[in-house]
């Protein structure tokens, strides 16, 4: 306790000492940095990138590489994983990382069908008790927690981390205005040229842009269409982790008709949506697995081309389209998208009625009850191409996330085989087979990926979005950033 207090005090004092500082602007509020609770709140994800680490991590090329693990081995039957930890790595409370911390974290995660053994102070072994599970290494990128965490999980921002930076100071009144990070071990040599990071939080994109123009911040990321900002450079990349999708309830008439779904896709102008609604600041999406190693770019090869000039016998059907509406309606593009869809399907004899549901009720009232015909909704995915829980027929009921009730024996088999081998080449073939089946069946229409734009002052070099998949990835090469 004394050592932990002294280290915290040192970090607090260090936060006042003049040093190279990056001021990063973020929209939103940090809520909870408990490692197993960090999910969709972007400010939490951004902070966690510096504060926590896992056994493994993704590098700038999208490959899984060792992080807190020095190395790891996989048994011949692909069911046993042995990790050798780096020695001399310390938590922010001054205690050394050991196998006990790994076992403690796994216990909190409650991984099913996985046993874990402590072989020695720095070696831990995982054993899969049932089938081979290819995404297991992806699970090992989960942030670790110290074994002496202190009893039950307590949500909040004050957590014990093990990253290269730690929270030194939090400024807040009714809301958090800024969080200051300093290097966890300032006396150790490293490659960081910025030794202090100040995250400054704003209510919306407009306030963020104003702060940049006033010189309050040095860098910021956004999906808003800001164009060029004076004295800032910009890099951009599609957000592979996030897609906006038109889900069809394939168990409900008239959407049980595959031919109808195919025509709905043919008559849907995705590029027009990107151009009209987002001013071109989005990327057309075509299906699952884009920007993974299976399909590293958006690929229309398994998507029917847009063609509303075909002569089609009118269906004379009414179709309900459900869209989420935020309290900040001016920040939601879904109403505009819905109108484009409505007009695009008129030549098919499809009359679209638009139903607006508050965003906070979409999952509980619409998705969970499958109370929709067509649903416009966003989806977050991880880097691993395993989408079993999203599209396998066994996942049609919660906690499965197969919203569309999609069922295909061919797709099921491809998804099952894709997670049963560790060979990336074999997995790629399996998932490409899945994509061909999925694309022909049209259980949903992927519309677009947001375009993430990262702005940084002209006096800063380094940001490049190499290996970018989700917003926190902008910091993957932070050790290369420099201030001129």
Image (cartoon, rainbow, N blue to C red):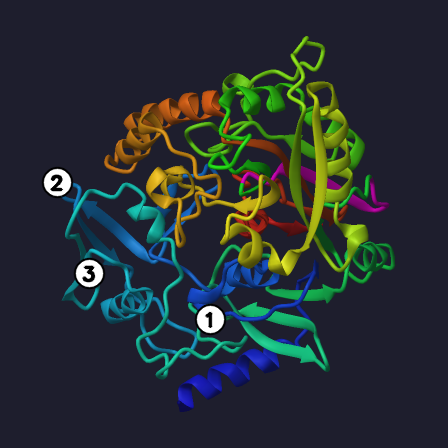
Q: Quadrant of residue 175?
A: bottom right
Q: Disc 3 vs disc 2: which is toward the camera?
A: 2
Q: Disc 1 vs disc 3: which is toward the camera?
A: 1
Q: Dot 3 lies on which element?
A: strand
Residue toward you, 95 or 53? 53
In the picture, the quarter occupied by the N terminus is bottom left
Instruction: Tell me if residue 231 is in the magenta stretch.
Output: yes
Q: Earlier in the sequence, mark 3 or mark 2?
A: 2
The outermost residue toward the top is 311
Part of the protein shown in magenta? 228-240
Q: Is residue 47 above or below residue 209?
A: below
- Crowding around mark 2 (Cα neighbors within 10 Å: few <14, some 14 to 19, many 20+) is few
Name the residue rendered at 65%, 56% in the picture.
359
Q: Which residue is mark 2?
A: 77
Q: Which residue is mark 3?
A: 124
Residue toward you, 62 or 268? 268
Q: Which residue is mark 1?
A: 34
Instruction: Tell me if residue 478 is in the magenta stretch.
Output: no
The outermost residue toward the bottom is 2
Q: How many marks?
A: 3
- Find residue 387 and name its label: none
């Amino acid at each position: 306790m004394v050592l932990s207090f002294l280290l915290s005090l040192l970090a607090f004092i260090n936060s006042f000492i003049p040093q190279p500082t990056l001021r990063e602007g973020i929209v939103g509020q940090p809520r909870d940095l408990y490692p197993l609770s960090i999910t969709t709140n972007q400010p939490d994800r951004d902070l966690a990138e510096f504060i926590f680490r896992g056994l493994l991590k993704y590098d700038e090329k999208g490959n899984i590489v060792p992080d807190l693990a020095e190395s790891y081995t996989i048994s011949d039957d692909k069911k046993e994983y042995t990790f050798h930890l780096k020695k001399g790595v310390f938590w922010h409370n001054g205690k050394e990382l050991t196998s006990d911390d790994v076992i403690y974290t796994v216990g909190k995660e409650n991984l099913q069908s996985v046993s874990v053994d402590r072989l020695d102070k720095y070696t831990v072994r995982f054993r899969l008790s049932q089938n081979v599970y290819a995404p297991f290494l992806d699970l090992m990128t989960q942030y670790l927690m110290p074994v002496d965490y202190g009893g039950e999980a307590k949500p909040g921002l004050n957590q014990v981390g093990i990253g290269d930076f730690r929270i030194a100071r939090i400024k807040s009144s009714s809301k958090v205005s800024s969080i200051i990070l300093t290097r966890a071990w300032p006396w150790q040599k490293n490659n960081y040229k910025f030794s202090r990071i100040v995250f400054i939080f704003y209510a919306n994109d407009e306030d963020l842009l104003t702060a940049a123009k006033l010189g309050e911040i040095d860098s910021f990321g956004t999906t808003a269409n800001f164009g060029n900002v004076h004295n800032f450079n910009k890099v951009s990349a599609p957000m592979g982790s996030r897609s906006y999708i038109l889900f069809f309830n394939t168990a409900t008439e008239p959407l049980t008709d595959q031919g109808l779904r195919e025509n709905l896709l043919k008559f849907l102008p995705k590029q027009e949506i990107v151009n009209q609604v987002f001013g071109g600041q989005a990327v057309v999406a075509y299906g699952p697995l884009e920007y993974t190693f299976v399909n590293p770019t958006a690929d229309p090869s398994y998507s029917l081309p847009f063609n509303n000039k075909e002569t089609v016998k009118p269906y004379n059907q009414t179709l309900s389209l459900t869209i989420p509406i935020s309290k900040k309606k001016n920040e939601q593009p879904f109403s505009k998208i819905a109108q484009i869809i409505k007009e695009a399907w008129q030549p098919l004899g499809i009359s679209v009625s638009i139903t607006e549901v508050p965003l906070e009720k979409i999952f509980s009232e619409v998705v969970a009850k499958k109370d929709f015909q067509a649903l416009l909704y966003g989806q977050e995915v991880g880097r691993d191409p395993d989408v079993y829980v999203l599209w396998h027929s066994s996942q049609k009921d919660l906690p499965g996330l197969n919203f569309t009730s999609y069922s295909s024996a061919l797709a099921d088999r491809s998804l099952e085989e894709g997670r049963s081998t560790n060979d990336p080449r074999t997995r790629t073939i399996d998932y490409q087979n899945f994509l061909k089946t999925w694309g022909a069946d049209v259980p949903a229409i992927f519309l677009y990926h947001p375009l993430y734009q990262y702005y940084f002052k002209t006096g800063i070099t380094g940001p490049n979005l190499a290996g970018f998949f989700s917003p926190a990835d902008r910091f993957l090469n932070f050790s290369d950033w420099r201030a001129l």
